[in-house]
Amino acid sequence: MFSQKTLPKREFRGVWVATLNAIDWPFSEKDSAEQQRRDFISLLNFHQKRGANAMIVQVRASADVIYPSNIEPWSLSISGKQGMPPKPFYDPLEFMIEETHKRGMEFHAWVNPFRAVTNTQYVKVCDDHISKTHPEWVLEYNTLKILNPGLPEVHQYVNSVIEELISNYDIDALHFDDYFYPYPDHGELKADRSTWRKYRVANESIRDWRRRNINTFVEGVHRLIVNKKPSLKFGVSPFGVWRNERDDYDGSPTRSGYTSYDHLYADVRLWLMNGWIDYVAPQLYQSTKHRSIPFIPTLEWWSNNSFGKHLYAGHAVYRVDRSLENGWRDKEEMPLQIVTARNMDKVEGSILYNSTSVWNNQGGIADSLKAIYPTPALIPQMPWIDGQPPQIPLEPEIFATDEGVKIQWKTPAMADDGDLPKYYVIYSTRSGKLPNIDSPHEILKILPSSQLEFIDKRTSQLEDYTYLITSLDQLQNESEAVLPQYPKDQNVILPQPYHEKVVVDLNSSALKATWQIINNIIDNENFTMTKDFN
């Protein structure tokens, strides 16, 4: 169906889960709290079986939130009425994060910073919504209301919302989408001209002023994260075209009617250059055959303009087999895009919009993902945030039980940077061979740090598989591998043409265990070895 290079051990595989109007979750605004929990678990299991290792969940859609807040009201999608909590009460965000981390997946909190009311004709806002308590902060554009990005008070307010979020929840990343200033679908925005006249610098044009507003805001969020939670990632998913090359020498070979820079006033390239964001996930929502914004050249432009930060391709699964654009009529288009992104230099993965389209197997994408992502993958590292690996799992042991082969270990001490493991990775291979920890094929399970044991139910015989265990920290730095200690009366045959020097080298460089060679060369260079820790 499509060709792939060797499968990567590290690859970002995300899914966007929109909560606005219950697009992806809850399945209905009328769902009970229990139904909401069941459905989110179903989503997690479904996507994980198709290779996903990160969920990008919309937690603040329109100045309302899906968690208990001292600043903003409950989202309409949670109870069917804005400002009303779920019944019976629970914290959806806390629940989501816990269930996501249980599965060894990352949770990225998706926030819309400035959108206040999506449609004034039918959305009823509660009395304590910011559009009512501070109407002077609001800009109206057609039926849309946004918080005015030109007001310092608005920046302070949104930053307070973000600070509350990142302080109270164990999220892995803060995520913004493409909405800063509104898309000019109904002509030029005029409601902020008085603010521009008040705050502009010298002869600054209104367009340059708007861009400065957004730049100042993004830089401020970056500084907030560095000061309050420096291990937190910060990513943005902008419109797919920064600028066209006809308008800017540094622009992409596209002919887009809208651009992030000129129309949404989001200078994402500058943010990457300045290191204000850790990843960019451009919404590349056109097909490879699109005449003005073809997928591959546009992604190539981003790969040449990511400035050492992570680049994840944003894919429009919702358009497969639905869009009038000819390229989306080919059901191989989406698999082609995902594999093209994988094989392109400086592209670290993909994010799929949206969860419901994958859930519905639109264009056969859910089936295709099983072939594209046949093995698990760790999240790519971000050494500019943290490059220090955690300590190895402490005192790992292995023994046979009626349920299967059981491996257990203890939490190690903190690493030099103060990090404890966030996850553990168990590698496995057949017939006593040492697992290759560089191969995703040999990742058996990724476990949360709260889980200090694992039972391999494939077998109850210690001789059938050999295991290695590593620790991962918050930023997915991985420790060296350690071999669990076998019962002292158990010998293990490694049917591999290892000579003694290879085993000793492995011992000294990777395993951090004392391996005692009982018999040297026996039966075609096989080795009998015990695992023992002194």
Image: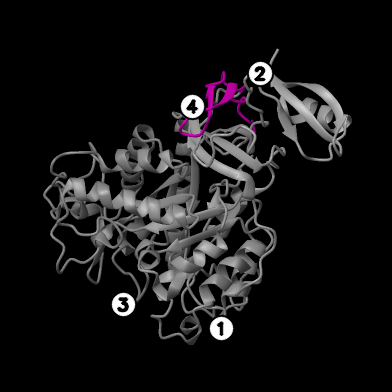
Res. 289 mark = 1
Picture residue at 16% right of the left edge, 63% below the top = 123
Q: Which residues are magenta?
A: 387-416
Q: Secondary structure at mark 4?
A: loop
Indicate which disc, 2 or 4, sits on the residue closer to the N terminus: 4
The residue that disc 2 covers is 489
Residue 443 magenta-highlighted: no
- Displayed quadrant of residue 89: top left
Horizontal and vertical percent position of residue 451? 45, 30
Separation (CA) of disc 4 from disc 3: 57 Å
State the separation of the CA atoms marked 3 and 2: 78 Å
Circles 1 and 3: CB distance less than 8 Å? no
Work out whether mark 4 precedes mark 1 in sequence or the reverse, and give the earlier one: 1
Q: Is residue 106 left or right of residue 380?
A: left
Residue indicated by mark 4:
452
**Label annotation for residue 186:** 3
Identify the mark nearer the N-term, 1 or 2.
1
Q: Are marks 4 and 3 in contact (CB under 8 Å)?
A: no
Q: Residues within 10 Å of mark 3 (few under 14, many from 20)?
A: few
Residue at 23% across / 44% down in the picture?
A: 72
Say which amino acid is labelled 2. Asp
Residue extending furthest toward the top: 534
Disc 3 residue type (three-letter): His
Place of residue 2 in the rendered image (x, y in percent of width and height, measured from the top left): 62, 73
